[in-house]
Image: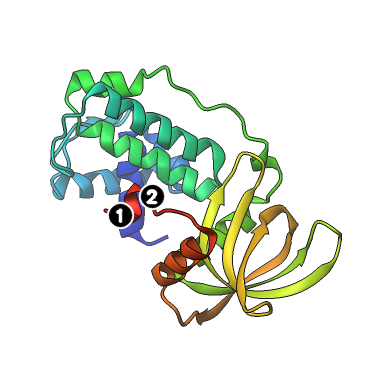
Amino acid sequence: MSRALRLTQLQQLLRRHRRPVAGQVLADALGVSLRTLYRDIETLREQGADLRGEAGVGYQLTPSDTLPPMTLPPAEIDALVLGLRWVAARTEPALAEAARDALARIAHVLPAARREALRDSGLRVGPSRAAAKVPPARLQAVREAVGSQQRLKFGYEDAHGQRSERIVWPFALGYFDEVPMLAAWCERREDFRHFRLDRIRQVRVLEEHYLVPRATLLRRWQKAQGIAPDWLDRS
């Protein structure tokens, strides 16, 4: 891990806690020695971070101008908490960690009363049946291929037990209660196809990017399926 990345992760760790965190806890989380942790803390302070505390007491990052101050009404706080907790509970570790970091960053720049409302929210997300069906590494590989617009190669077993090998252009990943579903252009079928991630085997992200922009594939698929664009597609 580069030092720049480690400093970013240290800030994220501190944002998740409202009270001082022991140096050893931070060092263990980052996989570094206490001496290295202390150097990193001094570096953050030199860069302008309002980082309070000392060895033996613990460290706490106070709100700063990392993000502009925000004032959110209670309903929007509920929406953020519920949405990000859903991601943290229902996706693979990398995306779940990003959701927790995002929630911590937002909390860090809210006024005190709103920050407490966010952290003390009673909205919770229950367990998912889908999470146990798909290995996290497979889910992460597919999600990242969608984001990077890279071709995917994998073995697939359909509902009748028929096996085949596919190379696809992945453009959308749906997180359903039962199982995640991949929407992709299939080179073998020369058409749009949907793949259950629990039936995918030996997935491999190929180096080549597919030729049609993801947004174009998404619009064509929506038209073919009779799916109206959602509010984000129209914005």
Q: Label 1 belongs to which residue?
A: 234
Q: Which residue is mark 2?
A: 230
x, y percent for residue 38? 30, 43
Amino acid marked by disc 2: Asp
Q: Residue furthest right?
A: 161
Is 186 placed above or below 7 here?
Answer: below
Residue 192, image quadrant? bottom right
> Label 2 vs label 1: CA separation?
6 Å
Q: Nearer the viewer, residue 208 or 175?
A: 175
Residue 33, compared with residue 22, is above or below; it is below
What residue occupies the far front of the structure in this picture? 226
- Mark 2 and 1 residues: CB-CB less than 8 Å, in contact? yes
| Quarter-of-image position of residue 18 | top left
Query: What residue do we see at 37% from left, 41% from top?
Result: 101
Secondary element at image label 1: helix
Q: Report whether 165 appears left or right of 14.
A: right
